[in-house]
Amino acid sequence: MVDLKKTPGYRAVVKRISEPYARASSYLFLRYYSTLFILPAEIGEFRHLKLLSLRASPVADLSPIARLTSLEELDLGRTRVTDLSALAEMTAMQDAVMRGQGGLSYEGTPIAKAAPFDRLVELNQPFRTVETINEVRRRCGLKEHIPTGYAELDKGNELTVQPLKGVLAPFDFHAIDGSIKLASNSIDWPIFPFPTSERDHDSRLETSRTLAVDLASELEDGRFNARPDYAASLSKYANRLPKKRGEGNILLADAEARSIRSMFAAEADILPIGLASKLKTILEQHIGLRVYYPEIEHFYRDVQNGRIESPLPLDAAQEFIRGVDQYTPVVFAPEVQEALGTSTSQSPEGVPVPTTVVLSPEGDQPRAPPDPLGNLNPRKARDYAFAGTVNSIWKAFREGEAVYRAVEGWRNAGKALEPYVHQILDWLSRYGGHGN
């Protein structure tokens, strides 16, 4: 390390700054060359410094310049800076860039490779300066500073459609490292009301998965004469069950259980007794497992209490999916595509849904057990789950927009998706009575 205070270069720099500054408040230029590693604390005394260039120097710590709140131009290009916290109070730079003066540069630095700054550094002025400093301010717990005229400049990027509140969905999403990604869903976390609940849950979960896997294998081996949909649904059910707490997808597992139950109820009289018995056991196990996930009941009630009969607008749904595909992986991680595809195919079409379940006398053909939560119309359940997934994606997008709204990919994705989001969320609002 070099002690700047003992170097001729440092004394010469300070002299060049202090002498002209004493005479007039003009733009000053300060450059630390490659031999200087540490900014001196005294630099913070030059409160009216307007321009500072540290380009191509090995400086990493910017804390000495935190008090230079009058800076209008700062060049950090090709330095070793890893933290921009010192810029939190430099709102004068945001104002100056709107007047066509100054601005912030930090390309070629370590911080320019870290999200979200990796996206922001690519922006043109004034977006780069305003958005970067506002991101720093948010991280420091400060309110964003929106300079005069910036809202007008950014007007074409504004999104007006807001996500709905209180809508359950099989997936949750967050804006992480510059893109929308899957996140842990609270629905998939079990509730344990009694001391023995945790042990009972784990036992039922493992039993449900084992029984489904075993029966799917028997069906695939041709042990029972039945439609191939049973093996496919059983395999999906087992795969979607949480493998440990907070993982898996209990709503999608439940959707597959509904599909199995619907097929079973419609074909109970023609199924082999051995297959019917095993299906009945699996469904009973699932009903017992479901009590640890109370939000499943909320989902059933939302679907059952839907206020409109019209289906989800198909064109809007298809265009939304197409838009997500178009902006993957620029904005959306590939797993978002998969989630949308899954939520559109929860239940097989054409499977009769019984309005009642007739219990046979003891010793007769096994029947599908009655569902204590009642039946769901497959189309309504699928539409509601898809719309809820869109709502969840849009919520994450709007959260990420606060950081990435000036990034070209995010801006274009927002403009492309918003019209279709509006149609889908309007349907969802009228269906379930959800308000903003």
Image: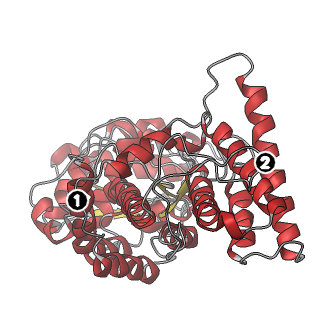
The circle drawn on residue 258 is: none
Which secondary structure lies at badge 1?
Answer: loop
Q: Which residue is mark 1?
A: 308
Crowd rating for badge 2 (residues with CA inside 10 Å; few <14, some 14–19, many 20+): few
How far across and how far down the image is residue 346, in percent? 53, 66
Question: Which residue is more in the foreground, 357 or 162?
Answer: 357
How far across and how far down the image is residue 132, in percent? 36, 56
Question: Which residue is more in the foreground, 66 or 243?
Answer: 243
> Amino acid under label 2?
Gly
Picture layout, residue 283 above or below residue 290: below
Q: Dividing the picture into quarters, in which one does residue 227 lie?
A: bottom right
Which secondary structure lies at badge 2?
Answer: loop
Picture layout, residue 404 above or below residue 410: above
* Residue 329 appears left or right of 399: right
How far across and how far down the image is residue 435, in percent? 20, 46
| Residue at image point 35% right, 60% down | 394
Question: Marks 1 and 2, how far apart in space?
Answer: 43 Å
Looking at the rendered image, the disc whose residue lies closer to the viewer, 1 or 2, is: 2
* Residue 412 appears left or right of 147: right
How far across and how far down the image is residue 148, in percent? 10, 55
* Residue 157 appears left or right of 213: left
Q: Which residue is mark 2?
A: 363
> Amino acid under label 1?
Ile
Q: Would residue 305 be visible to someone looking at this image?
A: yes
Picture layout, residue 370 above or below residue 419: above
